Image: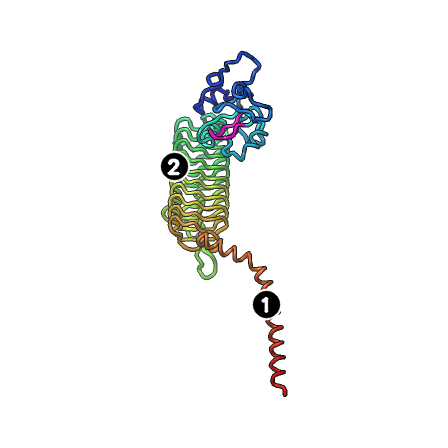
Amino acid sequence: MVLDFAQLCDLLEIPPPADRLAAPNTDDNASPDADLNRGRTDLDPPVTHPAISQPRVNGFTGVNTLALAGPSHFCFAEHADQAEAVSASRAGAVIVPHDFPAIAGPPLLRTERPRERFFSIAERFLPRCSPAGIHPSAVVDPSAQIGKAVSIGPNAVVGAGVRIGPRSVIGAGCVLERDLVIGADCILDANVTIQSGSEIGDRCILHSGCVIGGDGFGFAWDGSSHRKVPQLGRVVIEDEVDIGCNACVDRATLGETRIRRGTKIDNLVQIAHNTDIGAHVILVSQSGVAGSSRLGTGTVVAGQVAISDHLEIGAGARIGGQSGVTKDVPAGATIFGTPARPMKQTLRELAALAQLPALSKAVKGWHAELVELKQRLTEVERSLREP
């Protein structure tokens, strides 16, 4: 895809250069900002047009960071302290807020909410999905119901009774076991496995290697060995859920494991059987939720957090990285540490812990002084008793 400069300006809802930079001077070689800088000395910083600068290129083929961008890329910057990085960038254009400093360098496209505008446009450069149709190497059971404009990639397996909604994309090597449902406009990247009875809502994205509906970790000691408890439930994933690479969501022992609308799950996350993950929850990489725990709406769980079983995590709670959660968490609380406790308390304890080496050294000094004082006191008492 190529996005020309005028199209980019149109998407940002700012006038293109021809509309905003019509210069009254007649010098064809003059800079578009020449009128703004007329009469200024060489020591004065140049002034650029408050809305837009002259483009370097006619079209953009992608987006990138400020450091890595080339002339056919556009970028964004949000804060004035990024001015040096913007000036040094080779980008063809940089989307910035209205109050960003006027600097030499790439053309600046001034708009409100530059981050939001940038990513809304950047979506256009995502790789296009495979064209609709079933690849010849895919294995699709005759009883499967395939919606309109569905794409099924090479070596994918679609089991009996599977229903796939319109415009969904099933990547190469995916395995969809029997009697499961996938909604409309879903994307399953390569090698996703969804096991029988699971239900996936609309507009979900499942990244490569994730497994939905595997057996929960259920065993009972019978006196001589761990006996497997049958996992007879299912997994229900509501609309607009994103699940990262190699994440696992286990089926319930009985009933269901549910992930509610809009939740985003990072790579390598473990969701155990019978959990209930609320709407719009964030679960960051390598975190895990043990069986039958419930996370309220809007909970944020940072990386490598372990949440024990049968816990209630209140709506809007925030759990800091590498925490171990062993008790219920009130709604809106911010906790951290192992065992997890209120963030401020943990930080005070860590600050005190950092002082232990100095305190230990001081105590050793006080001990030496105390021993010396006791010896001197003993000598004084002995001298007083002697005639």
Compared to residue 45, the image places residue 277 above or below, namely below
Residue range corresponding to the magenta coloring: 92-102
Depth order, front residue of 2/65: 65
Residue ID at (37%, 46%) = 315
Q: Nearer the viewer, mark 1 or mark 2?
A: 1
Residue at disc 2, secondary structure: loop
Q: Is residue 73 magenta?
A: no
Task: Write down the residue under mark 2.
Answer: 239
Residue at disc 1, secondary structure: helix
Q: Is residue 36 left or right of residue 164?
A: right
Which amino acid, mark 1? Trp
Q: Is residue 90 left or right of residue 196?
A: right
Where in the figure is residue 374, as x and y percent of width and height?
Answer: 60, 75
Compared to residue 203, the image places residue 226 above or below, namely below
Residue located farthest toward the left when viewing the structure as drawn: 255
Q: Is residue 98 magenta?
A: yes
For the question of whether residue 176 can be seen, the reply is: yes
For the question of whether residue 152 can be seen, the reply is: no
Per the model, the C-alpha gap separating discs 1 and 2 is 65 Å
Q: Earlier in the sequence, mark 1 or mark 2?
A: 2
Disc 1 packing (10 Å; few <14; some 14–19; many ≥20): few
Compared to residue 257, the image places residue 26 above or below, namely above
Where in the figure is residue 366, as x and y percent of width and height?
Answer: 59, 67
Compared to residue 79, the image places residue 271 above or below, namely below
Where in the figure is residue 247, as x and y percent of width and height?
Answer: 48, 42
The quarter holding residue 140 reads top left
Task: Write down the residue under mark 1.
Answer: 366
Where in the figure is residue 170, as x and y percent of width and height?
Answer: 46, 32
Locate the C terminus by quadrant.
bottom right
Which amino acid, mark 2? Asp
